[in-house]
């Protein structure tokens, strides 16, 4: 089992590292850059950041449901990642390729989520939502 999990994570890392990662963010949002730094550390220094004042239109184009909006949208391979999605969830989605899923979202900016860490270590509970052709569902809980 451990070898299978390791193989999946390595495959996910290789897949993501071979593609350009592009993040559209609300201009001037500092937490977005904190999240992007974690993505760079996990997948390599390949994150292009675009300050996008027309992000709602971009979100619609890539299939992010309006109710799942946050402060940034990243494209990694064939998937959209909205908000402060944890790296482990990104890798798991890329490796597992669930049918009908276009991406993952973390609604809002939960304290303690990737890029939203605070010095005292406080963490809010939050869900990572899978979205796509079917009804959105909880992909993971943190």
Image (cartoon, helix red, strand yellow):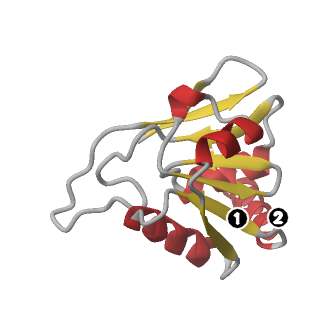
- The reply to whether residue 43 is in sight is no
> Which residue is more in the foreground, 89 or 6?
89
In which quarter of the view is residue 39 placed?
bottom right
Identify residue for label 2: 15
Place residue 132 in its image quadrant: top right
Identify which residue is drawn at 47% across, 70% down: 33
Q: Residue furthest bottom?
A: 45
Residue 2, horizontal then vertical, whole percent: 66, 56
- How far across and how far down the image is residue 123, in percent? 26, 49
Q: Position of residue 122 (x, y in %)?
A: 20, 54
Please name the residue that numbered disc 1 is placed on: 22
Judge the density around disc 2: few (<14), some (14-19), many (≥20) Cα neighbours within 10 Å.
some
Residue 26: percent from left, percent from top: 50, 56
Residue most extreme to the front = 53
| Label 1: element kind | strand
Quadrant in which the C terminus appears: top left
Q: In which quarter of the view is residue 64 placed?
A: top right
Residue drawn where x is 78% and y is 23% of the image? 133
- Residue 137 in the image: above or below residue 96: above
Whether residue 57 appears in this view of the structure is yes
Left or right: residue 18 compared with residue 69: right
Side of 98 where 72 appears, left or right: left
Total labels drawn: 2
């Amino acid at each position: 089992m451990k070898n299978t999990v390791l193989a999946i994570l390595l495959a996910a890392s290789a897949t993501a590292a071979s593609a350009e990662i592009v993040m559209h963010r609300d201009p001037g949002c500092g937490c977005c850059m904190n999240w992007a730094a974690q993505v760079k550390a996990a997948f390599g220094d390949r994150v292009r950041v675009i300050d996008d004042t027309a992000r709602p239109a971009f979100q619609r184009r890539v299939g992010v449901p309006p109710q799942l909006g946050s402060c940034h949208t990243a494209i990694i391979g064939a998937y959209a990642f909205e908000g402060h999605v944890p790296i482990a969830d990104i890798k798991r989605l890329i490796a597992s390729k669930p049918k009908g899923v276009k991406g993952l979202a973390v609604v809002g900016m939960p304290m303690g989520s990737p890029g939203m860490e605070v010095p005292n270590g406080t963490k809010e509970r939050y869900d990572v939502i899978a979205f796509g052709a079917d009804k959105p569902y909880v992909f993971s809980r943190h």
